[in-house]
Image (spheres, grey):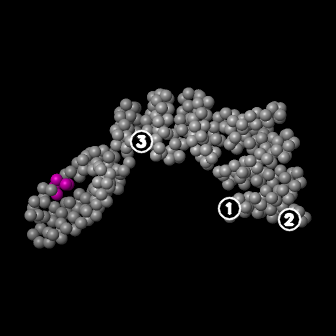
Amino acid sequence: MRYLLIPLILGGIGFIGYQMVRHRREMDTALMVKLVVSVLLLILMLWGTTLSTGATAAMGLPFVVLGLIWAPTIAGMMSDGTLGFLTGSENLGSKPNYAMAEGKRGRGDLTGALAEIEGQLQQFPDDFDGQLLIAQIHAENLRDLATARATLENLVTQPHHTPTQISRALNTLADWQIRFAQDRPAAQATLQMLIARYPGTALALKIAQRAARLSNTFEADQPGDVGTLVSECMKHLEAHPLDNHTREVLAEIYFSRYERADLAFTELELLVQTPHQTREDVARWLNLMADWHLKLGNILSARAALEEIETRLPGHVLAEKARERLFLLKNRQSA
């Protein structure tokens, strides 16, 4: 009876060997190791068929090990409704592989690269990386920004992508609009689309900084009439209320050039109270408030600003530095 297994074992070895050769460019290391081990086990089983005694043990143990190796994979394939490896399909893993597409792109075969990507997307519809790669080829290689934009705008309408992926797609589109079309208004509109999609989030705050910089950049010491500069900053902040840089610049102008310390503190307080600011920025603004209060001789207000750092950032190194400043300030008062 065991001799009837010889053709089956030889066939299994041949089939696995064929698949390894056919898909060698697409297999990850784990799958390749699993297949090599499987071939060795099958060879051991084949050797077991030649034994007159102990054949059951020689064939049974490799058979059990083989089952343990492949049971999770086969169960997953059956639950997904696909047996890609056994049928010879290109879908050997749980995610698409664009290595061949990237290779053809690198050799200048853009048509072939796009065809490879489309082939993967037929098996993995709406895959983020594949659609982004299609857009990249159109924008960066074919200089077809319209098609690239349409691809990404379709991508961001798909519901299963994460905010990080959506941000990557729209930031990439904004980059292309600046780089290839020199169209800053279009890039701003793209970024505003991203801000509107995730209002009130840390992502929206971060993107707002970039959108604001595309519009204008102010500095506290830039020349010109201070009243005009204040007016321009305020007008800019009406369009970009989350622009940290311009609001901080406006506060510095109020304090050092406009003689309105009250307005300067109001602007810094707005920055501190805006959700999702980084701890480093919050500590910097509160330290700046403390500096300005000390310049005005308001020691109690300076202490309050430093104590707020301790309250907001307990246990953080920035809180430790604030505590050191408070200690020095206390010694200064005692002297």
Give the image quarter of residue 30. bottom left
Report the residue marked by disc 3: 126
Q: How far apart are the alpha carbons under marks 2 and 1?
A: 23 Å
Residue 162: mark in rendering = none
Q: Earlier in the sequence, mark 2 or mark 1?
A: 1
Report whether residue 1 is seen.
yes
Q: Is residue 253 above or below residue 147?
A: below
SS assignment at label 3: loop
Q: Is residue 328 above or below residue 146?
A: below
Q: How far apart are the alpha carbons under marks 2 and 3?
A: 64 Å
Task: Report the magenta residues as a range.
Answer: 9-13
Name the quadrant of the C terminus. Answer: bottom right
Task: Report x, y in % for residue 187.
Answer: 59, 33
Residue depicted at x 42% and y 43%: 127
Give the image quarter of residue 2. bottom left
Identify the amino acid type marked 1.
His
Q: Earlier in the sequence, mark 2 or mark 3?
A: 3
Residue in the foreground of this view, choosing between 167 and 196: 196
Give the image quarter of residue 109. top left
Identify the amino acid type marked 3.
Asp
Q: Single out the mark in the foreground, 1 or 3.
A: 3
Q: Main secondary structure of the magenta part?
A: helix
Report the residue marked by disc 2: 331
Q: Is residue 119 left or right of residue 249?
A: left
SS assignment at label 2: helix
Residue depicted at x 53% and y 35%: 173
Q: Single out the mark in the foreground, 2 or 3.
A: 3
Report whether residue 34 is seen.
no
Residue in the foreground of this view, choosing between 328 and 232: 232
SS assignment at label 1: loop
Q: Per the image, is 278 magenta?
A: no
